[in-house]
Amino acid sequence: MKLSAFGKKFTRHSGILSLMDDLGNAMANDSDMIMMGGGNPAHIPEVETAFKERLQRILDSQCEFTRLIGTYDPPQGEKGFISELARFLNRHYGWGISERNIALTNGSQAAFFMIFNMFAGHYDNHQCKRIQLPLAPEYIGYADSGVKDDFFIANKPDIEHIDSHIFKYHVDFNHLTIDESTGALCVSRPTNPTGNVLTDHEIEHLDALAARHDIPLIIDNAYGAPFPSLIFTEARLNWNENTILCLSLSKLGLPATRTGIVIASEQIINALSGMNAIMNLAPNSFGSLLALDMVRDDSIRPLCQNVIRPYYEEKAKFAIHCLKRHMTGIPWRIHKPEGSMFLWLWFKDLPVSSLALYEALKARGVLVVSGHYFFPGITDGWQHKYECLRITFTQDSTSVDKGISIIAKEVRKLYGM
Ligand code: PLP
């Protein structure tokens, strides 16, 4: 059977597929494996209780139950949730948006597919544009989302060494080239995989550059405020007509409901609604109906700020404590943990590639993610790409401690210590 170019592109083995398969198989084959590789949110009892209670209220009302399972929403998404969310965002951020500035998608992953392909690829004048990632490392999930190849261009960061073990990436504006071939800028903030939170100044600078070149600035806020608020530092959340802000209910605790949220100009929301209609008729409304009351009465804010954020912040602190305890003598560094659910480890001049280290750790019962996956758009053999690991710190303390001690032993051996 012959496949079209589209068919071939999306059935060949993508990075994200091989990564997800590998993680899934390793877990299925070995239940003792310590999982420090995935991006699943933690199952926090208070959060699950809040959603359980809401679900019970829905089940208790025939009308709400029918709304939950028995209606196609408009292609833009569940109307009640969209209008409550617009009010919520205006109440807390004063953006002056309306329902016409919000669309829902089946997970934010699907939103990125639609948005990226709207701005990169072939244009009427036969020009070909790409998505610019101003700071790599960046989220692996973007990597294969273009309907054509050669879809991203990315910039290496400036590296600030904060102390002997902590560093922070910054956008290297001196080498950021935006020209006719740039379709849009995109950053995740907090960043998956590094936990970096681009500074307000960096975001303002990117926003000004995007406006000057008449291209949108896409901000992936999957871990940011107002939900799930996995952000351990001060950062302003701004929006304007040139920003495409993407949120998600996944990291709040609802990944299975597949709910992505896009806040953008009416023109972009109309375009996304049209694409939703073609691809899905309507987006899933399960997550938005579960979260509706919390957005209406603002209780989503204390849930995030007093339960979810402290939960992850404590986990991050514990993982750093384990690193300090187990890694003595090793030249280890981590990116300053400012948000998300990951630590980004950098072993400078590691004698093997991070992929070989990943394999060795898998054989010893610890699953991490090799850092080289997170450089879409960096095509040269930059050594740094192969010196880093992403570890997820959401497991229980015993597993995190054991996992980090095994990583330390393996790395020590590799350095010949
Ligand atoms: N953006 C980032 C930075 C992510 O880490 C993820 C998932 O891990 C997504 C987007 C996609 O999330 P979802 O499709 O569940 O909304």
Image (cartoon, rainbow, N blue to C red):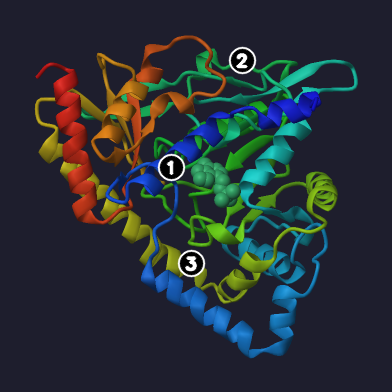
State the residue in front, 263 or 5. Answer: 5
Q: Secondary structure at mark 2?
A: loop
For the residues labelled 1 and 2, the Cα–Cα distance comes to 41 Å
**Residue located 50% across and 78% down the image:** 52
Q: What's under tag 3, amino acid-wise? A: Arg
Please provide percent x and percent y for residue 282.
79, 59
Q: Quadrant of the C terminus?
A: top left
**Within 8 Å of ligand 1, the CB of disc 2?**
no
Q: Secondary structure at mark 3?
A: helix
Mark 1, mark 3: which one is toward the viewer? 1
N-term mark: 1 or 3: 1
For the residues labelled 1 and 3, the Cα–Cα distance comes to 37 Å
- Residue 202 is left or right of residue 68, and the answer is left
**Can you identify the residue that label 3 sits on?**
301
Is residue 208 shown above or below 300? Answer: above
Q: Residues within 10 Å of mark 3 (few under 14, many from 20)?
A: some
**Residue located 57% across and 77% down the image:** 297
Question: Residue 60 lies in what quarter of the image?
Answer: bottom right
**Can you identify the residue that label 2 sits on?**
177
Q: Quadrant of the N terminus?
A: top right
- Residue 136 is left or right of residue 95, and the answer is left
Question: Residue 16 lies in what quarter of the image?
Answer: top right
Mark 1, mark 2: which one is toward the viewer? 1
**Can you identify the residue that label 1 sits on?**
25
Please provide percent x and percent y for residue 152.
63, 22
Q: What's under tag 2, amino acid-wise? A: Thr
- Residue 259 is left or right of residue 369, and the answer is right
